[in-house]
Image (spheres, grey):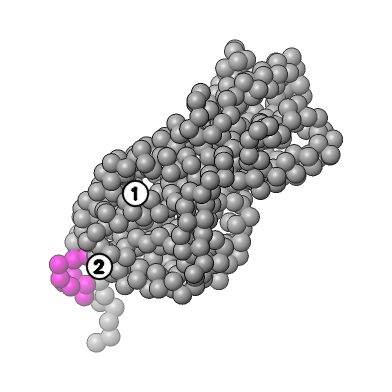
């Protein structure tokens, strides 16, 4: 038996250990899901709502334990893990509302009877979860998929299997009368390959742009599989003017360094005017970054950020930082480890990359690249100089600049005077280009979890012969 383990990145302690699902186990899970689909999909929506409401109640009962599991396994502070669980709980009500509004049933009276719009589930959905929000992000796929009538086979990230197992326990309690509607399989790449290579009707994925590009290629000849990709971004934040530099610096720090930079919507590039304001803002951001409390999830005083997911992630990010410095970028704040702590801990790094060629890549860590530009046209050109399009932000009190930014910036989440990471479950969340495939999640997940069926319906066949008129041969 092959086993999978996860570890607390703060101290290396074992968090979870369990069996890896091999190809045979994955195939068996998919077969069970296929057999369970007909009955689950045929249930009235009210019955499925009742199940997900039970899931919400179970999450509420176990929220403290689940938050500790997330915090230990990801390294994020407990306050943030609690917020993640709260988002999971809130997702249920939002998904029920979205299902009714975006994928419900509509009827219109016609001379012959009715025109009816219905939505039908696709079938068996494969969900691949990320490590940075191991509960909230897959939950945003799973809840609407089950509400729509699909069955789900879920593979958590191999770095956060404990969170996936805890979610599966909650679903097991909610689905006690509906076995195999939701299944959780554990494993790494081989398990994922077996899952997407099996008989599935949809792949709902949150993760890196590189993985998303791979899935596009894999499913190019499988048009029957719905593909919803929520990917990363090389997100710009244009800070052009502000009445209060310290408030603006707070927006930047929250955009760039929250969750230790491990959010797909984090600002990776700060674009400022080459003026006294731009310099003052950069200095204020650097000073504020120096004051951030960094620590383990359960430490006192409570940290604002924790370690990266593992030591390898820190090493990879450091190599990217050093590469930029080697290209000529000026180090404003070094990206280093922290003495006396595991190598997964890092300090936020900042580089001035003005005039330096920088690869258009996402560094999934607290690394901020600063560019200084002469005017707003140059700022927009720099902001849009990316193949990604997830999130973007503008710090400015100028309404005209904001209107221009909205029109010219191609991204799925565009914020003003608020962090680029700000998003709501009551709105769509997703990106363009290498950041997604035009199937945003959050409130719009209902769109990809069911397909529309249009029907003309009449109580009998009367009235059809008249449509032929006198155009028949005698």
Q: Magenta residues?
A: 453-466
Task: Count up the numbered dots.
Answer: 2
**Relative to 31, 437 lies left or right:** right
Instruction: Give the quarter of the image for residue 119.
Output: bottom left
Name the foreground residue: 43 vs 289.
Answer: 289
Give the residue number, with chain letter if any, for mark 2: 39
* Helix, strand or loop status at disc 2: helix
- Compared to residue 216, the image places residue 427 above or below, namely above
**Relative to 162, 281 lies left or right:** right
Earlier-in-chain disc, 2 versus 1: 2
Q: Position of residue 141 (x, y in %)?
A: 41, 52
Q: Position of residue 190 (x, y in %)?
A: 56, 67
- Compared to residue 254, the image places residue 29 above or below, namely below
Name the foreground residue: 460 vs 383.
Answer: 383
Give the residue number, with chain letter if any, for mark 1: 102
Name the foreground residue: 467 vs 273.
Answer: 273
Q: Is residue 87 visible?
A: no
**Residue at (48% x, 48% y) in the render:** 15
**Residue at (51% x, 49% y) in the render:** 14
């Amino acid at each position: 038996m092959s086993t999978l383990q996860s570890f607390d990145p703060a101290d290396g302690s074992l968090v979870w250990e369990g069996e890896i699902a091999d190809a045979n186990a994955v195939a068996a899970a998919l077969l069970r899901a296929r057999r369970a689909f007909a009955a689950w999909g045929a249930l009235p929506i009210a019955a499925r709502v009742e199940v997900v409401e039970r899931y919400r109640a179970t999450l509420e009962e176990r929220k403290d334990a689940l938050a500790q599991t997330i915090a230990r396994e990801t390294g994020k502070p407990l306050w943030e893990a609690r917020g993640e669980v709260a988002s999971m709980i809130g997702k249920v009500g939002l998904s029920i509302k979205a299902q009714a509004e975006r994928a419900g049933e509509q009827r219109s009276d016609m001379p012959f009877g009715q025109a009816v719009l219905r939505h039908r589930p696709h079938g068996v959905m494969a969900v691949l979860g990320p490590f940075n929000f191991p509960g909230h992000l897959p939950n945003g796929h799973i809840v609407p998929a089950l509400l729509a009538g699909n069955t789900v086979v879920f593979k958590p990230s191999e770095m956060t299997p404990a969170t996936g197992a805890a979610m599966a326990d909650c679903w097991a309690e909610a689905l006690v009368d509906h076995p195999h509607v939701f299944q959780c399989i554990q494993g790494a790449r081989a398990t994922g390959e077996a899952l997407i290579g099996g008989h599935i009707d949809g792949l709902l994925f949150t993760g890196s742009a590189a993985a998303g590009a791979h899935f596009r290629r894999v499913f190019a000849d499988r048009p029957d599989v719905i593909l919803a990709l929520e990917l990363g971004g090389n997100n710009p934040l244009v800070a052009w003017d502000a009445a209060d530099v310290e408030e603006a610096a707070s927006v930047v720090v929250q955009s760039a360094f929250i969750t230790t930079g491990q959010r797909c919507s984090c600002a990776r590039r700060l674009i400022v005017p080459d003026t006294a304001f731009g310099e003052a803002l950069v200095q204020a951001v650097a000073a504020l970054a120096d004051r951030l409390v960094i620590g383990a999830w359960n430490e006192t005083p409570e940290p604002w950020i924790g370690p990266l997911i593992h030591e390898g992630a820190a090493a990879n990010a450091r190599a990217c930082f050093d590469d930029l410095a080697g290209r000529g970028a000026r180090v404003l704040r070094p990206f280093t480890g922290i003495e006396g702590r595991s190598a997964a801990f890092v300090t936020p790094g900042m580089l001035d990359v003005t005039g330096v060629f920088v690869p258009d890549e996402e560094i999934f860590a607290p690394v901020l690249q600063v560019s200084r530009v002469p005017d707003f046209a140059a700022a927009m050109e720099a902001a849009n100089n990316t193949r990604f399009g997830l999130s973007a932000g503008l710090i400015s009190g100028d309404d005209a600049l904001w209107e221009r930014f909205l029109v010219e910036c191609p991204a799925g989440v565009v914020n003003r005077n608020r962090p680029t990471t700000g998003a709501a479950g009551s709105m769509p969340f997703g990106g363009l280009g290498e950041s997604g495939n035009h199937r945003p999640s959050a409130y719009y997940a209902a769109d990809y979890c069911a397909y529309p069926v249009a029907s003309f319906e009449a109580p009998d066949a009367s009235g059809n012969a008249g449509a032929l008129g006198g155009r028949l041969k005698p």
